[in-house]
Image (cartoon, rainbow, N blue to C red):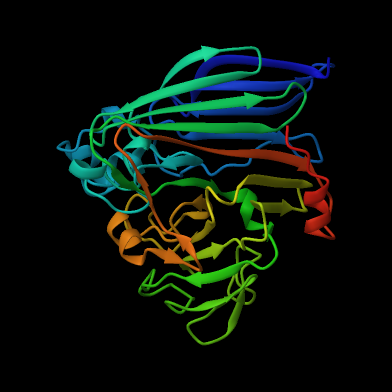
């Protein structure tokens, strides 16, 4: 036996979580994953660095956290987290969340608010088998049933996640979705690698009036984005050379070329000796959003203190909401939304793994040696 898996429930930042721990046959923990029961967000993905210290790879918000089901829209104390359509999500945000059935803005009445209803409902664990656990949720506002299955591998850090979506309505529905994975301190000194022949599209609208460095609507080839001053800006690092301390808030859509059967990224932190790799079927998500927030949002609860990189593989290139996605129709030959028939279903999947790596000389060779769990 290569190792063992330990499942259970517990708490993280005073919130209830489901968790799985992967250990070697000698009893050494190589990975711990924790998922919030309320909201379904990934709270922790903990691995060890080269010195044996445990590190949560995922972003942890610097503000007090609340379960979304206790965030009352009419309660004054929760106004710190924003308006009615964003409050439940922002107050409960985790390191990674499923944006569904919309990627981007939406009203509470129509979509469950910003980034959709999936991240504000309560998820229930339905089974705990030898190598996996599953969670299910009903979306009463938008009329969906969702099931997420997390599969683990004894003695390995790999986590495979399959999500099944069932339209409970009697009419077809247009949807967008994204896996919104956020990295905090881990990303600040990391380098990002993407598949070859990836195109970069800047946000079609100015992302941040004062602190966006990218020209709206620009197009280039990875790893560069077109800057507002017409410079080519290297996006493989969190900060911009010579401007590391400058507030920045930007979003670009990376379009994975059709010659690649899989979409993937490697986020490599050489200081910690950790390479974080995520792989998914390109046909399911041809777009990868790269979001940077570097102390630019001065309103609450961000308060000009937050540093986070979001890597968001998605059905839609931009977090502009459903109307924008339908109006765009396609980008670089890839449809920007899905239509699911009445009582129809579909599925998505991805796999994440943290590996020990002092350096990455050739990301393609690194990915060739990647073995999904």
User: In the displayed image of the protein, which residue is found farthest to the left?
Assistant: 74
Image quadrant where residue 58 sits: top right
The correct choice, above or below, for 168 with respect to 80 in the image is: above
- Residue shown at 52%/54% (left/top)? 308
Q: Which residue, as the protein is rendered here, is positioned at the far bottom?
A: 230
In the depicted structure, whether residue 115 falls above or below residue 66: below
The structure residue drawn at horizontal position 42% and vertical position 64%, both measured from the top left corner, is: 330
Q: Is residue 270 above or below residue 331?
A: above
Q: Return the x and y of residue 114 as percentages of the image width and height.
A: 31, 48
Q: Is residue 49 left or right of residue 188?
A: right
Whether residue 245 can be seen here: no
Up-down relation of residue 348 to residue 155 (above or below) = below
Closer to the camera in the image, 73 or 219: 219
Residue 204 shown left or right of residue 275 in the figure: left
Visible in this render: residue 365? Answer: yes
Image-quadrant location for residue 359: bottom right
| Residue plotted at (65% across, 12% down) | 130
């Amino acid at each position: 036996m290569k190792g063992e898996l330990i499942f259970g429930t517990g708490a993280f930042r005073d919130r209830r979580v489901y968790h799985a721990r992967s250990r070697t046959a000698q009893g050494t923990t190589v990975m711990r994953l924790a998922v919030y029961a309320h909201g379904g967000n990934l709270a922790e993905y903990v691995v060890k660095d080269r010195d044996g210290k445990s590190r949560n790879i995922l972003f942890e918000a610097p503000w007090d956290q609340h379960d979304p089901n206790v965030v009352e829209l009419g309660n004054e104390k929760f106004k710190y987290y924003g308006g009615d359509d964003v409050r439940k999500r922002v107050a409960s945000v985790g390191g990674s969340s499923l944006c569904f059935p919309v990627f981007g803005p939406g009203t509470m009445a129509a979509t469950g608010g910003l980034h959709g209803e999936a991240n504000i409902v309560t998820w229930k664990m339905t089974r705990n088998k030898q190598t996996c656990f599953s969670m299910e949720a009903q979306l009463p506002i938008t009329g969906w049933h969702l099931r997420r299955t997390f599969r683990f591998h004894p003695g390995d850090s790999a986590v495979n996640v399959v999500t099944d979506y069932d339209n409970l309505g009697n009419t077809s529905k247009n949807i967008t979705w994204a896996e919104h994975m956020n990295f905090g301190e881990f990303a600040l000194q990391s380098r990002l690698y993407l598949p070859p022949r990836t195109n970069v599209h800047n946000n079609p609208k100015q992302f941040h009036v004062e602190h966006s460095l990218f020209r709206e609507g620009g197009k280039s080839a990875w790893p560069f984005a077109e800057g507002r001053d017409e410079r080519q800006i290297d996006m493989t690092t969190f900060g911009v050379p010579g401007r590391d301390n400058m507030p920045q808030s930007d979003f670009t859509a990376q379009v994975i070329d059709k010659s690649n059967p899989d979409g993937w990224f490697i986020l490599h932190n050489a200081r910690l000796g950790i390479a974080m790799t995520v792989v998914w079927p390109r046909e399911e998500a041809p777009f990868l959003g790269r979001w940077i927030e570097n102390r630019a949002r001065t309103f609450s609860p961000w308060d000009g203190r937050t540093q986070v990189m979001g890597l968001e593989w998605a059905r839609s290139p931009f977090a502009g909401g459903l109307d924008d996605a339908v109006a765009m129709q396609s980008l670089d030959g890839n449809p920007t939304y899905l239509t699911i028939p009445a009582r129809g279903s579909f599925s998505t999947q991805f796999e994440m793994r943290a590996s020990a790596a002092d350096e990455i000389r050739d990301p393609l060779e690194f990915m060739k040696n990647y073995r999904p769990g």
